[in-house]
Image (cartoon, rainbow, N blue to C red):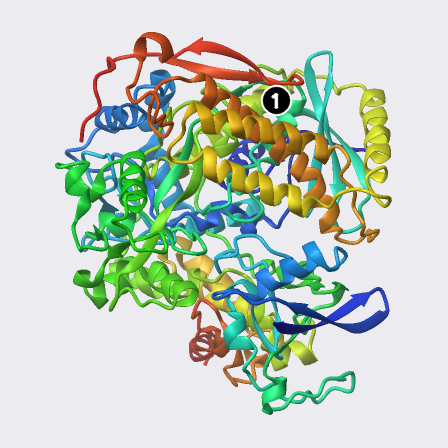
Amino acid sequence: MVKLTIRRQDENAIWYDTFDVEERPGMTVLEALFRIQEKQDGSLCFRYSCRGAVCGSCAMLINRKPGLACRTQLSDARTEVVSESEKEDVLLKHSNKDEDKYEILVEPLPNLKVIRDLIVDMDHFFRLVDSIEPWIAAPEDAGGQQTLMEPALQMQIEKYTNCILCATCHGSCPAAERDGEYLGPAALAKAWRFFLDPRNGEEGAEKIVSGVDSEKGVWGCDVVYRCVAVCPKKVPPTSAILKFRDELK
Amino acid sequence: MIDHDIIVIGGGLAGLRAAIEAYKLGADVAVISKVYPVRSHSGAAQGGINASLGSDDSWESHAFDTVKGSDYLADQDTVEVLCKEAPERVIEMENWGCNFSRQKDGTIAQRPFGGAGFPRTCFAGDRTGHNLLHTLYEQVLRAGIKVYHEWLVIKLDVDNGRCTGLIAMNLADSEIEAFRAKATILATGGYGRIYQRSTNAIINRGFGISLAYNAGVPLEDMEFVQFHPTTLWGTNILITEGARGEGGYLYNKDHERFMERYAKEAMELAPRDIVARAIQKEIDEGRGFPEGYVHLDLTHLGKQKINERLPGIRQISIDFAGIDPVKEPIPVQPGQHYSMGGVTSDKDGRTPMQGLYAVGECACISVHGANRLGGNSLLDTVVFGRRAGINAAEDVRSRLWPDEDGLLEACRQEEIRISGMIGGEGENFASIRDELQLIMQEHVGVFRNKKGLEHALDRIRKLKKRASGLRVQSKATVFNFELMNALELQGMLELGHVIVLGALAREESRGAHYRTDHLERDDENWLKHTLAYKGDEPLLEYKEVNIGRFTPQRREY
């Protein structure tokens, strides 16, 4: 048996519920949440889609760390020691004592408003990402010819195109915590992807650089690499931010 | 009431491509999706997208491979469109920013895929779908196309034989709203989740297909369900055909490369139906590993190639099976993967219902026939998505707005229907769904026969009765997923019913439909498409296959 303690919220009411779930080998936190939703409490809500760590829907806080529920094995999560939060709403006492090793704490992703239970306001996150105008402004008629690109450059860009916009980086970011208008790691990583891309042209690249040159952009970052640490796709937003800073110097 | 010239239901590749084209032609177009578009299942496609870009390749050769792969059930006029337009569409996606893998000379890299006579599958590592989906979404953002995300469409409205829009529920507050449209494009993907083992996203429940079916549009060739040969044992997450394209081997428990017995020439690169049956047979006859899998071995490819060409596969194997394919073979088993059948539609995405189009996996334009070749589904979405966008945009130019009254009345009725499902005594969706998935897996899978299909039919009829008393206990109005599940289950049961009935009637083996009691393909009686119309029992009719330049012949690899 695994105990999942889940932070619930409905409008202004906030509480924690604990559910027992029978663990099967290989079971993930997402599967456990389904088990609860289907057999114990149909009102529990959380987002999901691919269950294979490619769509980015099920980002949440698992044992106080941002991650994808579909990618987190119960067997790994239940033996983790959960750090005490600095916040006052903590009512859970976790330690490394044996009797506590069957508990997993599940909470919504931080730094975004909670809509209900584990569902947060992703519109805010997407608005920040979209504000960098993340697209190639290809001409209406590119002449039907492929753009040639060095394999090495393609692979450099790939580090950033791997982003699935799950917002775990945003949920781990101290700058996003203190400033709701800070563009955030995902948007800045994406900006770097479009800066690197030769299909965007010089004009496009200049526009991107000027769009991130502010305290809301690359200068707001604390360079603590939390976003890099939590990214399920190994995207390095902090590297992008530091490279932008070099460009701007 | 919300008005748009064109509403696209579904925010995956086909839907977004349709929306972009309609927008470019001046239509007021909106996309409505039950998830954020970048969460669509298109993003899970790994291996690639086919186009005859090579100087010694040709669209005719691509078309022949596709038709042969389809076991001659594909309509050859639509296959011609698919293969002719492929290079243009792929280059367009490149121009729009898709991060394709490159050859040394900077051109788009291509890899071999099953059933193809040429390495014509363009790819972006093993995250091709992800790259294409994000690229199209970026172009949708650029255009400023309106997206209604996290809305579940619950009914298509029909007036005088014409689709006039839809009724949808906003998942964020459970409010039900009427959307009026001069044209509606269905692009809602497949129904993988009616099977217990599927590579599909959990959201793929075929609800869009059931919306069309309930509105009176026939479904085509639903008995043709593709099982991907290599899905990760346990979770059935896709292990791309690209893994075999890059040189992976399949071994049974005795370390035999068993494909030798089934496709001597093509080996691991035989089409999916053949490889899936081979693996299932090895398992069924005791030559698989006891837990029901075989090995897909990539270790000889080396770490560098695996990291360059198959990084996602490596990560998935580590995350979900605790196996690093650089060091150990991957345990794989066949799983449901793709729906060849769907809402019947033509090469412009037109369904028989005026004002309604269907594209992508939810549609049956019949380019895939009885068995789809890998790399052709991503292509299908962008080719036919664009064509539907063009045709819908032309169609709406001369159209007047449909009458409001019908839509408002339909909206009221849906409100009553849905509030009637909440509270009170009755069964929860989960047990009925679990049973449906098990029945489909056991009796309507890689191998089928009369006895099993009759049994499945009987059980699905009973499940449908039980589902009529379905109740939702949660009264939450904000993201009530219990309600969404209950609504979608009703559609899943309809589709299961159609698939089983079509499979029972089709007394032959063709492509992915393999009857152990009718082992041969029977062109004399069964070279035809199945059409299923909604009734208490689905009503089956048949229509001719469009044969063009390629005369049906025996299929060998």
Quarter of the figure that contains the N terminus of chain B: top right
Q: In x, y percent, where is residue A1?
A: 61, 72
Q: In x, y percent, where is residue A22?
A: 60, 66
The residue closer to the viewer here, B26 or B233, is: B233
Q: In x, y percent, where is residue A59?
A: 59, 65
Q: For mark 1, give the secondary structure.
A: strand
The residue closer to the viewer here, B477 or A212, is: B477
Within 10 Å of disc 1 (Cα), the crowding (few <14, some 14-19, many 20+) is many
Which of the 4 image quadrants contains residue B127? Answer: bottom left
Q: Please determine whether, in this image, residue B418 is positioned above or below residue B41.
A: above
Please tell me which residue is depicted at 62% across the width and 82% down the height of the picture.
A174
Residue holding disc 1: B356
Amino acid bearing label 1: Leu
Q: Is residue B179 left or right of residue B533?
A: right
Please tell me which residue is depicted at 30% across the width and 19% down the height of the picture.
B72
Q: Is residue B396 left or right of residue B517?
A: right
Q: In x, y percent, where is residue B165?
A: 71, 26
Q: Is residue A40 left or right of residue A82?
A: right
Quarter of the figure that contains the C terminus of chain B: top left
Q: Please determine whether, in this image, residue A218 is positioned above or below residue B255.
A: below
Q: Please determine whether, in this image, residue B259 is positioned above or below residue A88.
A: above
Q: Chain of mark 1?
A: B
Please tell me which residue is depicted at 40% across the width and 43% down the height of the picture.
B93
The residue closer to the viewer here, B458 or B97, is: B458
- For the question of whether residue B361 can be seen, the reply is yes
